[in-house]
Image (tube, grey):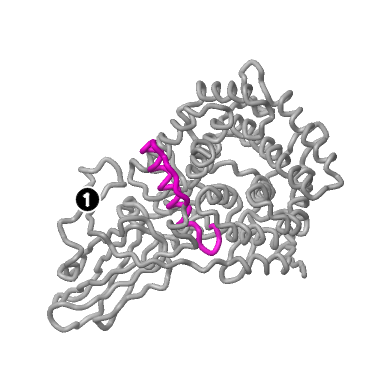
């Protein structure tokens, strides 16, 4: 059964209950693990730390936590030892004279130390401050067990007593964190990685993916806790080489397929709580990544039933995108349906968008051939026209680089996506990437591991393996050097305080699109 409804003058949604029921049939049962803090840590004074990613071990012993009672303006920081997603519980009692006033307590949950150094009251970014992970609690009667209902994404838990009274202090004991994920590390295949640095990057990638695998592939368990198509595509690829949870991939594909517009546009993300709701954000490349994600899934599983259910959605999405392609093969983007490519707006994304459509069309053709699509030659012809336009109009032989047609701009994203789209053969692509390395490395202006993933994969695909490994180590390895337990949403090595939101306190430090080294290492470096 399908039905439509309109939420504004522009968007009419097409809900397919049959597809959404199939999504519901693949909801996982979350695995819960009790985690105990491994110790107490303290801030490092500003004049003694080189970055805000530093903490030091406390001289206090976590095993005697209840001995360290806290009064007004006193605090302590619990260290869980790793990054986790779940709920926090702690026992609290009063010490000293009878409790003649309530306990006023602040709890702050941090994925990285820099969140502890940042003052929440100073935040003035464009995202809601309600994403800051802190709670203010009054407790009128002690002893009590404080069970916070909200889910947190963190490694550190700071307990700060705002006030008690001069006559008594608060004592804490039995802290526990109930970590949740749809998968377990026990499900991982055994792999041998001889390079210790790559092994560390692989392990942090896996932990990033695990913590983002909840009832859907979340983009970030701290923020936004949503299913985004660009993240899903990369998470699914990493998942195939690690946990191989096929049900969760199917659930997410069916969710997007069941909630699209009547014209065939697929939302960039969907909400699953309190009810299934598509967001009215649309990105040209993300809509196409439904097609590529379905193609990747079919290649991995040969699941013909899912292909039969979802192919019409993929075809409609492609047909809609192709309406923006001129007769000569030029893609014309619009402000109403932009490409994302990366958070950075320091470069023109037009040529990258052209390449992403070519990349997606090639994978759609695999689906079309699998279902014996009668119009398959029509799509091949469009693909060939787009490739010809790209190689003749957008490629500058003198520079050995792809350009932006209207400005002649040369940027990394244009080269990377055209290489991934394989508009040229491998030897030609290798020369393009070698020129890119010579002219644009070290990379500046790219803001996310999402785009760095595509750079690294383009290097692997163009037979530049040494350079691909080097870039992985320089980028993801730098995050580990800074103390990352999971990989971050946004990271510029040249600007450690970078945030697309105006403040690092709102950055997600466990983010889906950052987990891909596990895929890159698994696909291109591990022995089959």
Considering every residue shown, the one lying at the far right of the view is 374
Among the 4 quarters of the image, the one containing residue 22: bottom right
Left or right placement of residue 65 versus residue 81 in this view: left
Left or right placement of residue 71 versus residue 184 in this view: left
When the figure is inspected, residue 144 is found, relative to residue 22, above or below; the finding is below
Q: Please tell me which residue lies in front, 114 or 397.
A: 397
Quadrant of the drawing holding the N terminus: bottom right
Q: In the rendered structure, which segment of residues is drawn in magenta?
A: 189-217
At horizontal 71% and vertical 37% (from top left) the residue drawn is 358
Other-residue count near label 1 (Cα within 10 Å), few / some / many at <14 / 14–19 / ≥20: few
Residue 211 on image: x %, y %: 45, 57
Among the 4 quarters of the image, the one containing residue 131: bottom left
Left or right placement of residue 196 versus residue 223 in this view: left
Is residue 71 visible in the rendered image? The answer is no
Q: Which residue is mark 1?
A: 56
At horizontal 40% and vertical 64% (from top left) the residue drawn is 179
Residue 80 on image: x %, y %: 31, 59
Residue 402 on image: x %, y %: 64, 26
- For the residue labelled by badge 1, is the local secondary structure a helix, a strand or a loop? strand
When the figure is inspected, residue 153 is found, relative to residue 52, above or below; the finding is below
Is residue 316 visible in the rendered image? The answer is yes
Q: Please tell me which residue lies in front, 135 or 232.
A: 232
Residue 200 lies in magenta, yes or no?
A: yes
| Number of numbered discs overlaid on the protein picture | 1
Residue 10 on image: x %, y %: 74, 58
Q: Please tell me which residue lies in front, 13 or 237.
A: 237
């Amino acid at each position: 059964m399908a039905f439509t409804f309109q939420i504004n003058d522009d968007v009419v949604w097409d809900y397919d209950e049959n597809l959404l029921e199939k999504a519901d049939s693949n909801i996982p049962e979350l695995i819960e693990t009790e985690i105990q803090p491994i110790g107490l840590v303290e801030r490092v004074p500003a004049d003694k730390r080189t970055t805000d990613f530093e903490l030091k071990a406390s001289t206090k012993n976590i095993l005697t936590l209840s001995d360290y009672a806290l009064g007004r303006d006193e605090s302590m920081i619990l260290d869980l030892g790793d990054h986790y997603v779940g709920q926090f519980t702690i026992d609290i009692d009063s010490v000293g004279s009878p409790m003649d006033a309530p306990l006023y307590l602040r709890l702050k949950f941090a994925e990285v130390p820099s969140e502890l150094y940042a003052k929440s009251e100073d935040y003035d970014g464009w995202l809601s401050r309600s994403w800051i992970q802190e709670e203010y609690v009054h407790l009128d009667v002690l002893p009590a067990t404080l069970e916070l209902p909200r889910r947190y994404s963190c490694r550190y838990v700071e307990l700060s007593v705002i006030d008690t009274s001069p006559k008594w202090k608060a004592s804490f004991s039995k802290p526990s964190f109930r970590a949740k994920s749809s998968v377990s590390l026990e499900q991982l295949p055994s792999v041998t990685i001889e390079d210790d640095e790559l092994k560390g990057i692989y392990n942090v990638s896996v932990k990033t993916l695990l913590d983002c695998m909840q009832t859907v592939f979340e983009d970030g368990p701290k923020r936004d806790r949503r299913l985004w198509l660009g993240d899903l595509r990369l998470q699914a690829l990493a998942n195939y080489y690690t946990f191989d949870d096929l049900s969760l991939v199917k659930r997410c594909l069916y969710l997007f397929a069941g909630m699209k517009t009547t014209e065939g546009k697929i939302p960039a993300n969907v909400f699953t709580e309190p009810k299934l709701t598509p967001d009215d954000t649309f990105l040209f490349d993300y809509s196409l990544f439904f097609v590529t994600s379905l193609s990747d899934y079919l290649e991995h599983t040969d699941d013909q039933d899912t292909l039969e259910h979802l192919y019409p959605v993929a075809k409609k999405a492609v047909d809609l995108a192709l309406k923006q392609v001129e007769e000569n093969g030029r893609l014309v983007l619009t402000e109403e349906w932009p490409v994302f490519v990366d958070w950075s707006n320091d470069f023109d994304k037009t040529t990258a968008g052209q390449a992403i459509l070519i990349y997606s069309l090639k994978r759609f053709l695999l689906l079309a051939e699998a279902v014996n699509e009668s119009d398959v030659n029509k799509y091949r012809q469009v693909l060939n026209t787009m490739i010809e336009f790209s190689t003749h109009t957008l490629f500058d032989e003198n520079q050995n680089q792809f350009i932006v047609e209207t400005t002649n701009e040369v940027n990394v994203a244009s080269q990377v996506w055209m290489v991934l789209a394989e508009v040229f053969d491998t030897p030609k692509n290798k020369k393009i990437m070698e020129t890119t390395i010579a002219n644009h490395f070290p990379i500046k202006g790219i803001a996310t591991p999402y785009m760095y993933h595509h750079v690294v994969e383009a290097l692997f695909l163009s037979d530049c393996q040494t350079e691909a490994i080097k870039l992985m180590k320089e980028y993801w390895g730098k995050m580990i050097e800074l103390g990352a337990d999971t990989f971050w949403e946004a990271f510029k090595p040249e600007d450690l305080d970078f945030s697309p939101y105006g403040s690092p306190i709102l950055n997600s430090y466990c983010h889906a699109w950052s987990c891909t080294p596990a895929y890159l290492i698994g696909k291109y470096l591990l022995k089959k």
